[in-house]
Image (cartoon, helix red, strand yellow):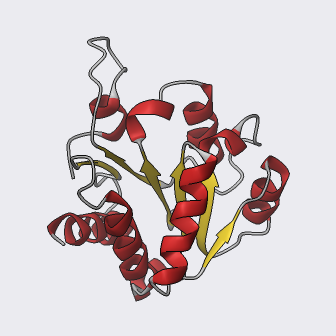
Amino acid sequence: MRAVEKLVQRVVEGIATPGAPDCGLEWHTQGSGKTLTMIVAAHLLRRQPTLDNPTILIVVDRIDLESQMLQNCEASGLPAVRATSKQHLEDLLKRDTRGVIVTTIHKFDGIRQRIIIRRNVIILVDEAHRSQEGDLGIDMRAALPNAFRFGFTGTPIDRGKVGKGTFKTFGSPA
């Protein structure tokens, strides 16, 4: 709950205060509830009136995790839409869909840059250590340049290079 409260607080303060931190890293151990943490955070973010009906993307790196996340959202009463393809994800974003979208990182491949530039977009990335430093992570950030970004991982990576690693990508732990 502490992680959820800090994440929500960071987003609410970030909307109100230009230049405030807009990312964070939640470092959970395997099996400690990253999925539940993301779902509870999404529930609370959707209820924040200051966020003016945000778009929340839950980004995973495997199809089986996408299905699992959708099942968990449904079981917890969190309405979510699954982006079924790259084109479907782009259509959802072009239509300015609000609510929760669950997708794999792979569907950001080649997506249009700056597709949504509004600030009330929150990206929750599962297994953040795997997919964020390559082209797919770059494409995602280019498509949603003003989004808040939070990485969830049990195994953050420090590449020892400037601009590389999970800590660098998501800033200091949230």
Rendered location of residue 14, percent (x, y): 33, 63
Rendered location of residue 168, percent (x, y): 31, 30
Q: Quadrant of residue 139?
A: top right
The residue sitting at 20% across, 45% down in the picture is 173
Which residue is situated farthest in the left direction here? Answer: 2
Pick the front one: 35 or 99: 35
Q: Is residue 57 above or below residue 8?
A: above
Quadrant occupied by the N terminus: bottom left
The residue sitting at 21% across, 41% down in the picture is 172
Q: In the picture provided, is 39 more to the left or to the right than 63?
A: left
Q: In the picture provided, is 11 more to the left or to the right than 28?
A: right
The residue sitting at 38% across, 33% down in the picture is 129
The residue sitting at 23% across, 57% down in the picture is 32
Q: Is residue 30 above or below residue 132?
A: below
Rendered location of residue 24, percent (x, y): 29, 49
Pick the front one: 58 or 150: 58
Rendered location of residue 119, percent (x, y): 51, 62
Q: Is residue 122 above or below residue 126?
A: below
| Number of numbered labels in the structure image | 0
Looking at the image, can residue 31 be seen?
yes
Which residue is situated farthest in the top direction here? Answer: 161
Q: In the picture provided, is 119 more to the left or to the right than 142?
A: left
Looking at the image, can residue 56 be seen?
no
Q: Is residue 107 above or below residue 101?
A: above
